[in-house]
Amino acid sequence: MKGIKEKHPLLMRWTHWVNFPILTIMIWSGMLIYWANDEYKITLLGHTYVHFFPDWFYNLLHVPGRLAEGMAFHFLFMWLFALNGFVYVLYTIISGQWRQLLPNRHSFKEAWLVVLHDLHIRKMAPPQDKYNAAQRIAYTAIIIMGLGSLVTGLAIYKPVQFNWLCWLCGGYHLARIWHFVLTIGYVFFFLIHVIQVILAGWNNFRSVVSGFEVVNVRPEPKIENNNGDEKV
């Protein structure tokens, strides 16, 4: 027997979906800014193995020569990104949803079991409530990453006015490195998140849109009274 169960509150769904285009624009505009000084690379013993990013990548996305445009979009949408994140965190605290989001002392052990199950190495998935252990860790990490992006972004944006913030980040150059690393982290999180959504199936995706999911409900047993009539 099928039934409908509420899973995701409206405000959590709104902040989730609003964050997607905002973060996309932030990453895109960040690429326009990074093009002006793309100094980061992975070098070992004098040999460069990875250079972020090759010229063909910039030309493919029509990035070169759009620094002012990138700065305008980035400095506008960063406030929307911060506001959306603030509303999300505040709501989880007030509503008590944080209890289902924060990892517990068993989460890191169970997260490994979730990974083994997703890789079809382990048949049975560990028990879960609204979110499994891996989701708890990932969703908490993305909130911390968002705070890190805001702090490092402000340190880069106003290194003189927020000199204490720049100092906490280890200086302007290190703040810029952390900001770049966090952006790469968002890209990896997004790719893994999309794959997990596809593997979870339509019912899981529908719950993030509508707030409800279809579940199997065990029918209540019928009991006969003394007259032989059935009642639930």
Image (tube, helix red, strand yellow):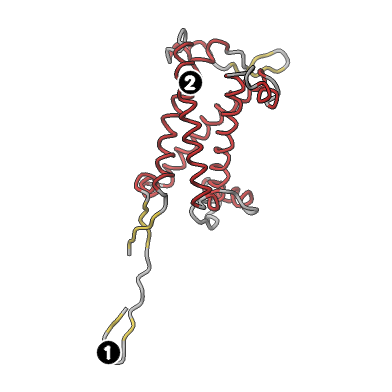
Q: Position of residue 172 (x, y in %)?
A: 66, 18
**Amino acid type at image mark 2:** His
Q: Which residue shows up at 66% across the image and 22% down it?
A: 166
The CA span between labels 2 and 1 is 73 Å
| Label 1 residue SS | loop
Which residue occupies the foreground of this view, 200 or 232? 232
Question: Total number of numbered labels?
Answer: 2
Q: Position of residue 11 (x, y in %)?
A: 41, 44
Mark closest to the chain's N terminus, 2 or 1 = 2
Asked if 218 appears above or below 22 in the picture, the reply is below
Asked if 189 appears above or below 205 in the picture, the reply is above
Which residue occupies the foreground of this view, 1 or 83? 83
Q: Mark 1 — residue?
A: 228
Tell me the number on the disc at residue 152: none
| Label 2 residue SS | helix
Badge 2: how crowded within 10 Å, few (<14), some, or many (20+)? many
Q: Position of residue 47 (x, y in %)?
A: 68, 14
Q: Nearer the viewer, mark 2 or mark 1?
A: 2
The quarter of the picture where the C terminus appears is bottom left
**Amino acid type at image mark 1:** Gly
Q: Position of residue 188 (x, y in %)?
A: 53, 32
The quarter of the picture where the N terminus appears is bottom left
Q: Which residue shows up at 70% across the image and 23% down it?
A: 167
Q: Mark 2 — residue?
A: 74
